Image (cartoon, grey):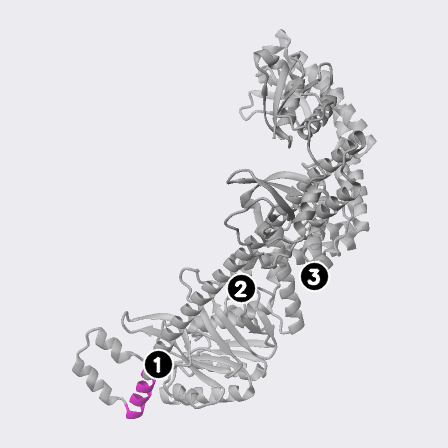
């Protein structure tokens, strides 16, 4: 791609925006090398990688690039035998760690969201944990070699600290001596040339043997090393030299380790640079609110509300344009400062961005083509040094374009034919457009020449366009209108500004009849466009309203179906629970009857009990489906009487009315059981007055069981001394026997004690099916040591 074109279309400014999102100098360097590609497959891979990075940022946040440094020079120096310093080795260790952390991050993302390109790239990052551990064992976070780097270094530093302490202590002892203090400028120990010294006054220099290492600016103070500490300072100096030699040895060993894996490190750096480069493109996509364009290689462009990325969001006017399908050439006309050049640059820049693997600031669904090259002649490039006029500059550029372009090129021409005689310029512009159009290139050209409007009007594959201008406000709207040629608006603007009408009329008379007809045609087209656009907006608004209503209705219907299904399920569960409860109660009664049969030789027969049990099993309703129709309610009779065959609704079981107790309850015989049921819960099956064979059978069955008071059943139960668990079992048995014996009240004696037994029994009575109510006994009944239960 011609670098001049990149400069003309401000591509470098986009690179600068991307560089602001790079986390490392590696990524910034890779971005500076970014150029658009004309290879369709390469561009597809670039965009796919950017798309994966955008999704990673959206789902998991920014990728971790912390600690990664550009260590190219350090690695190259290690490979040729140089010795790295601690800071360089520390950067290498951090880069190894940062690369491994980034690799783990991308592998974890892959478990939730497929990022094949990024993960494949990350595979090229070397682990090298042993190198990292070895370096960090020797060098701390301040890039200093630690004592643990080697046993010898630890020994030398231990001895060095001891020697320094002895030398300092010896001098501090001298400083504290009163006879010496008067000879010192200050009572302190300091260091000069890595040796411990004391500040001695000039006049007392002869009182101290030793060496002078420094003096103050005035010469009044001498920094002397007394002879008493010379040997100690010599030892300190010797140990420091050994320390330096040992550190150099350690650094050489670590550098050799780095040199062994130099190729792997450099390969990891290339991968890290590429990943940072990709995530920087994702970052700028988020900043510009850009979207993934649809690519093609057939020369088709369809930009939906595209925005120039270098114009602020509150000022930019979105661009809608289509090129390469019904027409391959667009000729844009309109006044100056109307936005023609910006529209031209937007088309070219968005194409360059897509070809570079960048998202474009446009709506979803925008399509862009991968051209083999993009050519542009935009702006005035006249040169005094080369003696080129505006026209000459344009023509030089256009000649270069004609020489290099191919049928798969995009050509952008601004102010075609400008800078020369209008008649010759318009003729030359038409000839150039015709040549490029026949070549098959995609062309967008801007011009002021009215002749080009007529040229585009009757040529297949060429269409007029214009920049909209508001006559009322005398200002451009910067909207590109494809299909409508631009008007000059000169007369209208002059009239609005107050030019005399006579002058304007005279000017109109100077315009040729054909030109006036063209202007009239354009005015009609623009009027029709405005009407069509208004109708389109109305239809679009109505379509949106209908879509909203449809969505609301669909949501309401879905909520209704969900609520209905939940109500059906709840009703079915309640019905099943009710039947299960009835079955449990019936099982308990049947068990008790069998016990009575064994103990009292009751007249109840086994086959009667089995029939009753079978009928209860058949009474369990099958769960209906969620979509089953609701069962219609049976018609309630005006009056029920003894002998009527009825259906107990909540049990779904047939029975026969023994007697109507009052206007709300009736006693119903259900097989071997007799129970009180609310009249509202009964449905008439067969009236007693209608006769039928079922009545005698029911009476015969009802006569086989009579609930009479057993002489062996007592009305009181003594639980004193029992634990709560055994007491509850006894109370349950006692209540069943008392209920069958038709007792009204029973007395449970539990004693006063700690109250645990009384509380547990009260809680059990509160839930028992035979107990209507209960209370603590009265004074003459035993008080708080007795609980009185009233049975149903």
Pointer 1 or 3: first along the chain = 3
Mark 3 lies on a secondary structure that is helix
Q: Is residue 518 magenta?
A: yes
- In this rendering, the answer to whether 180 lies above or below 384 is above
Would you call the spot at circle 1 few (<14 residues within 10 Å), some (14-19), or many (20 or more)? few
- The picture places residue 260, in percent across and down from the top left corner, at 82, 50
In this view of the protein, can residue 175 be seen by the observer?
yes
Rendered view: 692 above or below 401: above
Spatial distance from mark 1 to mark 2, Cα to Cα? 42 Å
| Extent of the magenta region | 512-523
Q: Which mark is residue 528?
A: 1
Where does residue 631 sit, x and y in percent of width and height?
A: 58, 56
- Residue nearest the viewer, comparing 500 with 429: 500
The residue at which mark 2 appears reads as 12
Per the model, the C-alpha gap separating discs 1 and 3 is 51 Å
Mark 1 vs mark 3, foreground winner is 1
The residue tagged 3 is 117
Q: Residue at x 74, y 47 (%)?
A: 614
Q: Residues within 10 Å of mark 3 (few under 14, many from 20)?
A: some
Which quadrant of the figure has residue 339? Answer: bottom left
């Amino acid at each position: 791609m011609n670098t001049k074109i990149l400069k003309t279309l401000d591509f470098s400014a986009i690179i600068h925006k991307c560089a602001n999102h790079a986390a490392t100098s590696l990524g910034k360097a890779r971005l500076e090398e970014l150029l658009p590609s004309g290879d369709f497959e390469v561009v597809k891979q670039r965009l796919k990688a950017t798309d994966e990075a955008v999704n990673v940022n959206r789902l998991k946040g920014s990728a971790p690039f912390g600690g990664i440094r550009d260590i190219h020079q350090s690695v190259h120096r290690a490979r040729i035998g140089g010795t790295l310093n601690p800071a360089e080795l520390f950067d290498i260790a951090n880069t190894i760690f940062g690369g491994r952390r980034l690799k783990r991050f991308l592998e974890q993302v892959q478990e939730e969201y497929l990022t094949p390109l990024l993960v494949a790239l990350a595979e090229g990052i070397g682990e090298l944990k042993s190198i990292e551990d070895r370096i960090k064992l020797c060098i701390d976070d301040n890039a200093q070699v630690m004592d643990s780097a080697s046993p010898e270094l630890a020994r030398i530093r231990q001895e060095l600290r001891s020697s320094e302490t002895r030398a300092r202590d010896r001098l501090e002892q001298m400083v504290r001596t009163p006879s010496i203090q008067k000879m010192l400028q200050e009572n302190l120990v300091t260091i000069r040339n890595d040796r411990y010294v004391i500040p001695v006054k000039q006049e007392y220099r002869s009182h101290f043997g030793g060496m002078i290492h420094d003096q103050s600016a005035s010469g009044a103070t001498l920094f002397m090393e007394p002879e008493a500490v010379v040997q100690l300072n010599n030892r300190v100096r010797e140990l420091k030299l050994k320390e330096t030699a040992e550190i150099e040895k350690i650094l050489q060993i670590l550098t050799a380790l780095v040199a062994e894996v130099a190729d792997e490190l450099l390969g990891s750096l290339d991968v890290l640079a590429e990943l940072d480069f990709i995530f920087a493109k994702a970052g700028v996509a988020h900043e510009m609110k850009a979207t993934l364009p649809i690519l093609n290689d057939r020369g088709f462009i369809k930009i939906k509300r595209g925005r120039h990325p270098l114009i602020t969001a509150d000022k930019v006017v979105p661009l809608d344009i289509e090129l390469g399908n019904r027409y391959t050439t667009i000729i844009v006309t309109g006044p100056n400062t109307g936005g023609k050049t910006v529209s031209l640059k937007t088309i070219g820049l968005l194409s360059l961005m897509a070809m570079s693997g960048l998202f474009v600031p446009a709506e979803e669904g925008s399509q862009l083509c991968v051209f083999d090259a993009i050519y542009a002649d935009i702006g005035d490039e006249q040169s005094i040094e080369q003696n080129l006029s505006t026209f000459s500059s344009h023509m030089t550029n256009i000649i270069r374009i004609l020489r290099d372009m191919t049928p798969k090129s995009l050509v952008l021409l601004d102010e075609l034919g400008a800078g020369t005689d209008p008649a010759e310029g318009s003729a030359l512009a038409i000839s150039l457009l015709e040549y490029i159009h026949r070549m098959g290139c995609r062309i967008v050209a801007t011009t002021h020449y009215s002749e080009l409007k007529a040229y585009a009007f009757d040529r297949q594959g060429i269409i007029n366009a214009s920049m909209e201008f508001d006559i009322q406000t005398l200002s451009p709207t910067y909207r590109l209108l494809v299909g409508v040629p631009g008007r000059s608006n000169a007369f209208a603007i002059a009239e609005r500004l107050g030019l005399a009408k006579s002058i304007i009329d005279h000017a109109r008379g100077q315009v040729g009849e054909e030109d006036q007809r063209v202007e009239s045609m354009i005015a009609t087209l623009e009027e029709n466009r405005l009407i069509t656009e208004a109708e389109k907006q109305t239809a679009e608004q109505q379509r949106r309203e209908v879509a909203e209503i449809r969505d609301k209705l669909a949501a309401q219907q879905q909520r209704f179906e969900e609520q209905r299904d939940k109500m059906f399920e709840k009703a079915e569960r309640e019905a099943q629970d009710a039947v299960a409860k009835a079955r449990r109660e019936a099982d308990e009664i049947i068990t008790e009857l069998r016990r009575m049969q064994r103990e009292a030789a009751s007249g109840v027969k086994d086959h009667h009990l089995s029939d009753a049990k079978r009928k209860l099993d058949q009474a369990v309703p099958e769960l209906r489906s969620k979509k089953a129709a609701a069962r219609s309610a049976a018609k309630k009779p005006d009056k029920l009487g003894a002998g009527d065959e009825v259906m107990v609704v909540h049990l779904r079981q047939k029975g026969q009315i023994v007697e109507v107790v009052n206007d709300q309850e009736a006693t119903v015989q259900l097989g071997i059981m007799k129970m009180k049921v609310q009249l509202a819960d009964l449905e008439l099956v067969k009236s007693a007055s209608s006769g039928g064979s079922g009545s005698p059978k029911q009476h015969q069955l009802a006569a086989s069981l009579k609930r009479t008071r057993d002489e062996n059943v007592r009305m009181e139960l003594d639980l004193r001394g029992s634990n709560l668990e055994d007491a509850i079992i006894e109370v349950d048995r006692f209540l069943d026997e008392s209920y069958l014996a038709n007792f009204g009240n029973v007395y449970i004696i539990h004693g006063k004690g700690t109250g645990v037994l009384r509380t547990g029994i009260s809680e059990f009575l509160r839930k028992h099916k035979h107990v209507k109510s209960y209370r603590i006994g009265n004074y003459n009944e035993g008080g708080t040591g007795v609980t009185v239960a009233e049975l149903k």
